[in-house]
Amino acid sequence: MKTKSFTLIVISVLVALGLAYAYTRRQAEEYVNQSNSSFGKQIDDENLETIYLAGGCFWGLEEYFQRIDGVVDVISGYANGNIENPTYNDVSHKNTGFAETIEIKYDPTKIDLTDLLLYYFKVIDPTSINKQGNDVGSQYRTGIYYTNDKSVEEINRVIEVEQKKYDKPIVVEVLPLKNFYKAEDYHQDYLRKHKGGYCHIDLNEASKGIERDPSLVKLNPYARPSDDVLRQTLTEQQYNVTQKGATDRAFSHEYDKHNEKGIMLI
């Protein structure tokens, strides 16, 4: 009887461990899927912004931007051509005017357009016309295609700063988005589905970060100032309270005995 009871206990423990393992594995798989920006994260689209970038073969550019924090979704496609619903063959051989382009949806609370463009310029040759890496043709031209006219000033500011790095002129076209068509399914997440596939850019650049020129001041008025600026504008006590979690000493505040009439909001 004891042997039978012991066997039942062992079986129960093994079943429990199996169920726990299955649950943990499922949770891990769900986390990985949610972390894969190409499949989209559960964030309200109304809070996202979009930019379209062309920089040679879209396989590498798509995978590159998927690795950047703040980027929520990346889709490979064809932009600014002269027919509807183009195929890869149309874009490659029929002079349809399209550029291989990626659509980037990003969270502006984590990354702004300027930083995205700085990542973009790290991996393209902006002085090359219709050629990136081994790919040659107008479909491989570089381009920044926007949907909000307010973006133009920011785009031009970045290009002006980048131009200082080159003797030849930057030839990246900056145009409003005329049209964009999603590429065939086999192009989506290509480098994730085909390890070791062709890529003309160094994907490791995504993890190295960017250096932002001091002239490229963040346009977001709510962005946190640098630590140096905060120390210059705040008193020591204000800095410690707002940045270090310190607490004002009781009855020491400048408004402790403030008796002037004010406004009460009810």
Image (cartoon, helix red, strand yellow):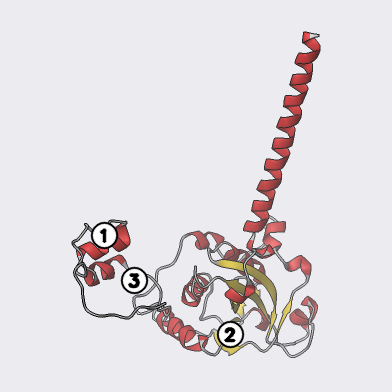
Circle on res. 240: 1
Mark sitting earlier along the chain (1/2): 2
Q: Within 10 Å of the Cα at label 1, are there few (<14), some (14-19), or many (20+) other Cα atoms?
A: some
Pick the residue in front: 14 or 208.
14
* Spot occupied by residue 57 in the image (x, y as percentages of width and height): 65, 72
Query: The N terminus appears in which quarter of the rendering?
Result: top right
Q: Amino acid at mark 3?
A: Pro
* Residue beneath disc 3: 225
Whole-Å distance between the Cαs marked 1 and 3?
15 Å
The residue located at (75%, 14%) in the rendering is 6
Q: Hey, which quadrant is residue 260 in on the image?
A: bottom left
Asked which quadrant contains residue 201, the reply is: bottom right
Q: Which residue is mark 2?
A: 146
Judged left or right of residue 161, residue 192 is right
As helix, strand or loop, the secondary structure at mark 2 comes to strand
Residue type, mark 2 in image: Tyr
- From the image, state whether disc 1 or disc 3 is nearer to you: 1
Secondary element under disc 1, as helix, strand or loop, is: helix
Kindly identify the amino acid type of the residue bearing the numbered disc 1: Asn
The answer to whether residue 39 is left or right of residue 238 is right
Tell me which numbered mark, 3 or 2, is placed earlier along the sequence: 2
